[in-house]
C-alpha cells in the first residue's frame, strides 16, 4: 500500500521533470545545459515574475537562456553570469538577494517575527503561571479546609 | 476589552501593509542602469538601409530612447501620446524596434505615425538585454553625457510624461 503510493509520487515527480525537459530546446552539450539550468533556476523571469528563468516560456526567458549558454561556452564563471544578469535587471532577478542595507529587513524580517512571537509566548506563559498559582489561604480558611478533610475520612 | 486590542492592532497593521501593497506596481522594478552610461551598440536603422545608429551619435543632447514593437499591444496604447509629444519637438525620441519584422514595423509606423527621429533595429533582442528590457514598451531618458537618468517600464501615460519625464528633461537640458 505504502510502496504503491510512493511509486505514484515518484512517477508524478519524474514525469513533471521530463515534461520540463521537453519544453527546453536540447543543447548539444549536456554539461552546458546542466549548468544553464542550474544558473537559471536561481534567476527570476521578469516577464512572469513568479517563474524561474529556467521554467519560463516567455520569449525573453528563451533569449536569456541562450545568452547564458553562450556565456558558459565562452568559459564564464557562474558568478560572472549572475553579475551579467544583475547588472541589467537588478537584484530583483535573483531569488536569493544579496545581503545589503536595503535587504536587511527582508533577511532579518522572519527573525524579528520569531523574536516577537517568543516574547509574546514568554509573556503569556508568565501570566498564566501567575494566574494558576495556588491562592494563598488565610489561617481561617486553612482551619476550615482541615475540618472538611477530616470529616470525609471514613 | 484590553485583550482584543493587540489582535486588533496587528490586524490594522496588516491591512495597512496589504493596502499599500495593492497600490504598488510589481513591474516597477528599479533599474540598476540608472545613472550608468547607456550601453553602447551599433544597429542598422529601420528607415534607411545601410545606415546605422549608435548612442554615441546623440552625445551632447538629451534624448528619449523608446523600445517598441509592432506586436506589442501596450505600445499601441502609448503611441498617440508619443506622436503628439514628438510634434512638439521638445526632445528627440529615438526608437528601438525590438524583436520585430521589418515589414511589420514599417507598416505599423505608416499606420499609426512615426514619432521617432529614427528607429534602430534590434532584431534578435540582444541590445534589449543590455538595456534590461523586459516589458515593452520601455522608455529611457538619456542625458548629454550619455548617462541613463531614468527608465520607465510600460506605456508612458500623460501623467508620467508631465510629472516625471518632462521635468527631468527640462532639468537635464539646462
Image (cartoon, rainbow, N blue to C red):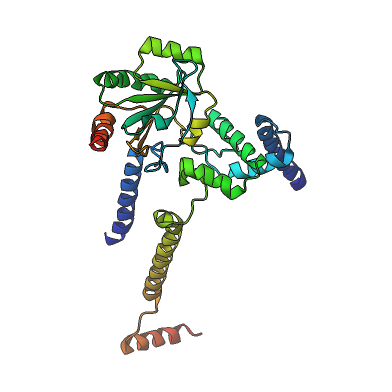
Front in this rendered view, residue A9 or B69? B69
Residue B141 x/y as whole percent: 34, 34
Residue B102 x/y as whole percent: 50, 15
| Residue that appears at 37% across and 71% down | A127
In the rendered picture of this protein, how many numbered marks are placed on residues? 0
Relative to A19, is A80 above or below? Answer: below
Determine whether, in the image, residue A71 is placed left or right of residue B132: right
Relative to A126, is B33 above or below? Answer: above
The quadrant in which residue B56 appears is top left
Residue A48 in sight here: no
Determine whether, in the image, residue A121 is placed left or right of residue B160: right
Residue A97 x/y as whole percent: 49, 51
Front in this rendered view, residue A62 or A106? A62
Front in this rendered view, residue A87 or A103? A87
| Residue that appears at 36% across and 87% down | A142
Relative to A115, is A31 above or below? Answer: above
Residue B152 x/y as whole percent: 36, 33
Residue A28 in sight here: yes
The quadrant in which residue A64 appears is top right
Determine whether, in the image, residue A35 is placed left or right of residue A47: right
Task: Look at the image and tell me in which quarter the N terminus of chain A lies.
Answer: top right
Amino acid at each position: 500500500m505504502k510502496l504503491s503510493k510512493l511509486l505514484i509520487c515518484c512517477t508524478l515527480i519524474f514525469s513533471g521533470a521530463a515534461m520540463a525537459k521537453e519544453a527546453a530546446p536540447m543543447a548539444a552539450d549536456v554539461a552546458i545545459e546542466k549548468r544553464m539550468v542550474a544558473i537559471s533556476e536561481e534567476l527570476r523571469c521578469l516577464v512572469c515574475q513568479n517563474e524561474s528563468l529556467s521554467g519560463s516560456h516567455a520569449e525573453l526567458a528563451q533569449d536569456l537562456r541562450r545568452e547564458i549558454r553562450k556565456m558558459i561556452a565562452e568559459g564564464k564563471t557562474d558568478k560572472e553570469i549572475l553579475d551579467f544578469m544583475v547588472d541589467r535587471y537588478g537584484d530583483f532577478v535573483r531569488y536569493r538577494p544579496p545581503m545589503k542595507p536595503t535587504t536587511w529587513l527582508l533577511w532579518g524580517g522572519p527573525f524579528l517575527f520569531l523574536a516577537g512571537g517568543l516574547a509574546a509566548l514568554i509573556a503569556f506563559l508568565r501570566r498564566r503561571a501567575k494566574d494558576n498559582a495556588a491562592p494563598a489561604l488565610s489561617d481561617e480558611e486553612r482551619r476550615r479546609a482541615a475540618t472538611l478533610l477530616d470529616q470525609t475520612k471514613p | 476589552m484590553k485583550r482584543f486590542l493587540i489582535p486588533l492592532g496587528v490586524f490594522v497593521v496588516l491591512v495597512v501593509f496589504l493596502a499599500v501593497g495593492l497600490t504598488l506596481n510589481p513591474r516597477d522594478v528599479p533599474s540598476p542602469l540608472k545613472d550608468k552610461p547607456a550601453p553602447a551598440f551599433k544597429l542598422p536603422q529601420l528607415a534607411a538601409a545601410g545606415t546605422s545608429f549608435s548612442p554615441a551619435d546623440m552625445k551632447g543632447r538629451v534624448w528619449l530612447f523608446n523600445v517598441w514593437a509592432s506586436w506589442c499591444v501596450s505600445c499601441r496604447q502609448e503611441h498617440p501620446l508619443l506622436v503628439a509629444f514628438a510634434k512638439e519637438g521638445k526632445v528627440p525620441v529615438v526608437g528601438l524596434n525590438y524583436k520585430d519584422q521589418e515589414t511589420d514595423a514599417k507598416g505599423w509606423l505608416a499606420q499609426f505615425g512615426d514619432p521617432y527621429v529614427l528607429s534602430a533595429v534590434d532584431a534578435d533582442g540582444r541590445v534589449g538585454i543590455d538595456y534590461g528590457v523586459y516589458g515593452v514598451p520601455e522608455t529611457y531618458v538619456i542625458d548629454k553625457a550619455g548617462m541613463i537618468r531614468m527608465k520607465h517600464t510600460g506605456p508612458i501615460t500623460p501623467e508620467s510624461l508631465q510629472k516625471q519625464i518632462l521635468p527631468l528633461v527640462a532639468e537635464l537640458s539646462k
